[in-house]
């Protein structure tokens, strides 16, 4: 079940394994993490706008160790916006994530899709993000404690971060707990299948959005995604999730497009982005 960890603070889940959770978990409000080892810190995701990543980066600096590595679970802006806060770290991500970070930021779409952060996006565009320095193209140990596992489902370039000795998986946006997932660039069918592997990896799962959880939370998400593929969503635990009204049509449309062989952004997502 979801764990009630404190938010907006570096909370130590296990020895040297920290989460920085943001309450709510809605669009633009993601989680991050940090793993401390002998040579320094590995940061996992970097949040989005300055008001989010500045306090996170300050808390990481407060650990008193150099930040050697930043791992990006995927390219969505609410996970990569704060990379400049860690200027000396190597940046690890998959090839699709690297390619997306090399593109110009779609500033107007961000403003339309996430109006709550409207005032901060100009600063984000000016600050920019760092390019990926190390592309990850297969499952590999990153450090003695941290393993990287490429995946797909939420995007084509998802990356799971496993700390096996602590039985903790940082799932990025392959897991949304208590929050409706968003699959506009994903594949709900693949995503649902991929969750079997995520559940096998670790008992404790840190999602990209929402509180820390585990298998029951991932199973609820899996069931929701399979209903999206089927085209209708019956009553269920997802009735308590935020952003259902906005995201159900996007997820259902995306699954239907893929089933028809059309790898396209759903029209409902384009409308939500003002395009
Ligand atoms: Zn995402």
Image (cartoon, grey):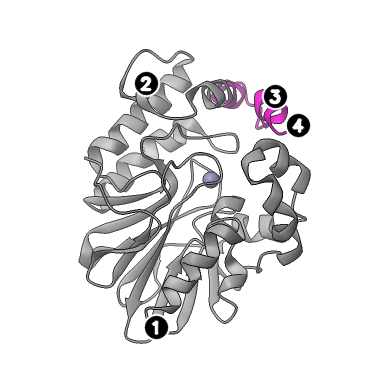
| Residue to which mark 4 is pinned | 274
Instruction: Look at the numbered disc 2 and give the secondary structure of its residue.
Output: helix
Name the spot of residue 6 as percent of width and height, x first. Answer: 30, 54
Q: Which residues are magenta?
A: 253-275
Q: Residue at x 63, y 61 (%)?
A: 98
Q: Are marks 2 and 4 in contact (CB under 8 Å)?
A: no
Q: Count residues near mark 1 (Cα–Cα under 10 Å), then give few for <14, some for 14-19, many for 20+.
A: some
- Reading the chain from its start, which is encountered first: label 4 or label 3? 3
Q: Residue at x 48, y 75 (%)?
A: 69
Give me the C-alpha separation between circle 1 and circle 3. 45 Å
Instruction: Look at the numbered disc 1 and give the secondary structure of its residue.
Output: strand
- Reading the chain from its start, which is encountered first: label 4 or label 1? 1
Tell how many labels. 4
| Residue to which mark 1 is pinned | 40
Q: Tell me where residue 261 sits by quadrant.
A: top right
- Reading the chain from its start, which is encountered first: label 2 or label 3? 2
- Reading the chain from its start, which is encountered first: label 2 or label 1? 1
Name the spot of residue 213 as percent of width and height, x first. Answer: 27, 45
The quadrant the C terminus occupies is top right
Q: Residue at x 45, y 84 (%)?
A: 66
| Residue to which mark 2 is pinned | 239
| Residue to which mark 3 is pinned | 267
Q: Count residues near mark 3 (Cα–Cα under 10 Å), then give few for <14, some for 14-19, many for 20+.
A: some
Q: Tell me where residue 96 sits by quadrant.
A: bottom right
């Amino acid at each position: 079940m979801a764990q009630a960890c404190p938010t907006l603070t570096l909370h130590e889940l296990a020895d040297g394994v920290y989460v920085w959770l943001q309450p709510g978990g809605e669009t633009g409000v993601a989680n991050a993490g940090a793993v401390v080892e002998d040579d320094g810190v590995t940061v996992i995701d970097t949040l989005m706008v300055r008001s989010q990543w500045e306090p996170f980066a300050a808390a990481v600096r407060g650990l008193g160790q150099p930040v050697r590595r930043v791992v990006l679970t995927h390219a969505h802006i609410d996970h990569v916006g704060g990379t400049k806060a860690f200027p000396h770290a190597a940046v690890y991500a998959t090839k699709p994530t690297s390619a997306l970070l090399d593109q110009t930021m779609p500033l107007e779409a961000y403003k339309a899709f996430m109006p709550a952060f409207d005032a901060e996006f100009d600063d984000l565009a000016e600050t920019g993000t760092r390019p990926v320095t190390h592309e990850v193209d297969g499952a590999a140990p990153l450090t003695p404690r941290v393993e990287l596992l490429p995946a797909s489902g939420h995007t084509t370039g998802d990356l799971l971060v496993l700390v096996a000795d602590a039985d903790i998986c940082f799932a990025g946006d392959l897991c949304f707990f208590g929050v409706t997932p968003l699959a506009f660039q994903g594949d709900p069918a693949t995503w649902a299948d991929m969750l079997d592997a995520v559940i096998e990896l670790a008992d404790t799962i840190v999602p990209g959005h929402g509180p820390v959880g585990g298998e029951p939370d991932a199973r609820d998400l899996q069931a929701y995604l399979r209903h999206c593929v089927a085209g209708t969503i019956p009553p269920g635990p997802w009735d308590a999730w935020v952003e259902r009204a906005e995201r159900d049509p996007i997820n259902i449309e995306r699954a239907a497009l893929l089933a028809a062989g059309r790898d396209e952004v759903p029209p409902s997502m384009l409308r939500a982005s003002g395009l």
